[in-house]
Amino acid sequence: MKTLTRTIHKLFPARMTASAHCDGPCGVYDPASARIAAEAVLSMTRKILDLDPGDTSHATVNSLSRYIAIKEEQAQLAKTDLLILWTDYFKPQHLEKYPDLHDTFWQAAKLCSAVKVEVSIEKAEELLVVIRKIHNIFWDTKGREVAYYTAG
Amino acid sequence: MRRNDSEKLQESNCREVFLWLCRRRRRCRVMGPSMRPLLSTDDEVLVDMMAYRHQLPLVGDIVIARHPTQLGQQIIKRIKGLNGDGQLYLQGDNPDPAQNSSVMVPESLVLGRVTSRFAESK
């Protein structure tokens, strides 16, 4: 049977393939990308709230649309970056040291959704607090001390 | 639950090849090192694409799944964990952490269960 299957394999290799590669370029992960996106969300939230709600001029409506679009986009980006970090980088052995790891990422993902739905500075700041916690856990798993900072 | 013979993979026997000829199994070629030492690049496996229509995935199963973020890519990994809301934790067998990246996928993205090794690349 082995000879038969090997012959078939050589003459007619399977067309269907499945990747058994490591998903990222071998360990290039960093929560900084999520932090930058979350900072952009906070900035856009502030800008939206700074606009005069009574001003319906084209210029203001245009600015409001742009701020909302960027907030939406950056919140989704933060969520995607966090989910990749959660599912691709972290492994079960990390849970032993950080038993609330899943809760932390779940909370962060929920906040990414909340900052899209709402115009809330509190939620945007809360998201940055959770990302800071993820930053500390992440670099601790790497055995490196990397100071947290914000661009804004 | 965990499948008993999870760390092994049987060679394709007459029954498996018969099922393949009857289109109840699909041949699939492995690309990459994350399932080593069990499976290497260019090894071929048989996959039961109907496996999870009537039964639930078990920890220890080797599965083919759609990648959750990379569109069009199929991955082969082992189920390392299940959680209650239909998410599967998949990881390669390779003991080198740089080569066995893990991924969380919803059950709906699992295409089938690997049932046997059809042929080795060497």
Image (spheres, coloured by chain):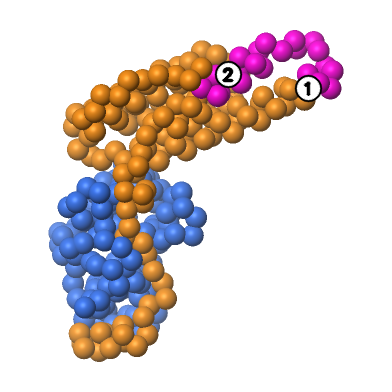
Residue, x 84% and y 18% (percent of image)?
Answer: A57
> Which of the 4 quarters of the picture holds residue A139?
top left
Q: Disc 1 sits on a residue from what chain? A: A
Q: Which mark is residue A43?
A: 2
Q: Residues within 10 Å of mark 2 (few under 14, many from 20)?
A: some
The kind of residue tagged 2 is Ser
Indicate the chain coloured blue by its letter. Answer: B
Residue, x 24% and y 72% (percent of image)?
Answer: B116
Asked if both marks, 1 and 2, belong to the same chain, the answer given is: yes
Q: Which mark is residue A32?
A: none
Q: Which mark is in front, 1 or 2? A: 2
Q: Is residue B72 left or right of residue B114?
A: right
Q: Residues within 10 Å of mark 1 (few under 14, many from 20)?
A: some
Tell me if residue A17 comes above or below residue A127 in the rendering. below
Q: Disc 2 sits on a residue from what chain? A: A
Image position, residue B91 (x, y; %): 27, 51
Residue, x 74% and y 22% (percent of image)?
Answer: A63
Q: Is residue A119 magenta?
A: no
Q: Secondary structure at mark 2?
A: helix
Magenta span of residues? A39-60
Q: Main structural element of the magenta stretch: helix, strand or loop?
A: helix
Q: Is residue A64 left or right of residue B84?
A: right
**Res A131 visible:** yes
Q: Secondary structure at mark 1?
A: helix
